Image: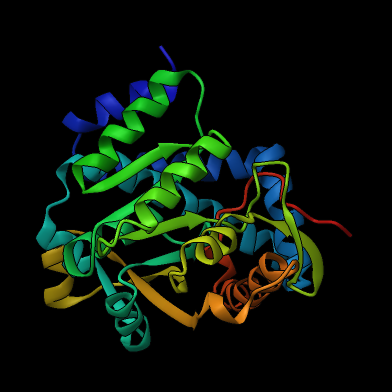
Amino acid sequence: MNSLLLAMRVARYTPRSLVRGGARLGATVGWLRAGKSRQRLEDNLHRVTGLAGKELSRLSHAGMVSAARYYAEVLEMPRITSEQVRARLRFVNEKDALAAIKRGPGAVVALGHSGNWDLVGAKTVLEIAPVTSVAEVLKPREVFDQFVELRAKIGLRIYGHEGSRTFRELLREAKSGEERIVALLADRDISGTGTEVEMFGHRVKVAPGPAALAIASGLPLLTVTSYYERLRGARRRAARSKWGLVMEFGPVFDPADFKGADGVQALSQAWAEWLGSAIEKHPQDWHMLQRFGWVE
């Protein structure tokens, strides 16, 4: 049986403290081994922050621990209640975004691989609107199906990343007139047809989906990031976790301002600029342990 699938099944019956402690230990062991995941993370973080040597090593260790925290929370999802989701996450700068969603109705959201995007989705479902998203189809397929099932339990509708067919489904939902958010992880392009933008002071390729979908549907495009914060007192007890998340909203972009042949590239540049600056402020929570779309 796939090790990740086994972990997902065993975690349901394992004390939360053991799941979290095991994830942190695994992250530290993986960091000490200095394998490909650490090397890729350090390469990515060096380009984002300019750090090197011991400073970069400390940051990459914090990054791998943060990524392990995310996976521990994913394994914990079947046991996380709505009240705990509300306690763990708080909004920042949400006023303009919430108004745009009401006018939409709905919105397209460009996200990065920061913090915990699944809990961001759960919080959004509880307090804003239903959420549809896309996930990479993992192998074996049973692992992907298990992730979809977990996310469905917290109210997320997930499509597999299957090219133009998936885009048509997302466009159908976006144009339905229903107040619904289509949230897409977009800082790492997995389509092979990435849009080139400037991000972190480098030329990179990002996913064209958010901009293309916003322009095709007419819905506003929002930017959102998340990063961890320590919890204390009543909020920590309500969350049943020492860690919570800040869900920070960025600018709202009107796709009508990005018409023409270069509309997708221009709108992608707009959201990437804000998201890149947000990641630079909290690089330890950017879980980019894979190849990134650096062009230069």
Q: Is residue 122 visible?
A: yes
Q: Residue at x 35, y 81 (%)?
A: 100
Q: Is residue 116 visible?
A: no
Q: Nearer the viewer, residue 55 or 151?
A: 151
Residue furthest to the right in view is 296
User: Quarter of the image holding residue 101?
Assistant: bottom left
x, y percentage for residue 73?
31, 48
Position of the N terminus, as image quadrant, is top left
Q: Residue at x 58, y 64 (%)?
A: 211
x, y percentage for residue 201?
79, 75
Q: Residue at x 85, y 56 (%)?
A: 295
Q: Is residue 119 above or below residue 35?
A: below
Apparent side of residue 36 relative to residue 212 in the rendered image (left or right): right
Q: Nearer the viewer, residue 132 or 117?
A: 132
Which color scheme did the rendering employ for the protein? rainbow
User: Quarter of the image holding residue 131?
Assistant: bottom left
Apparent side of residue 60 relative to residue 214 in the rendered image (left or right): right
Q: Nearer the viewer, residue 132 or 288?
A: 132
x, y percentage for residue 293?
75, 52
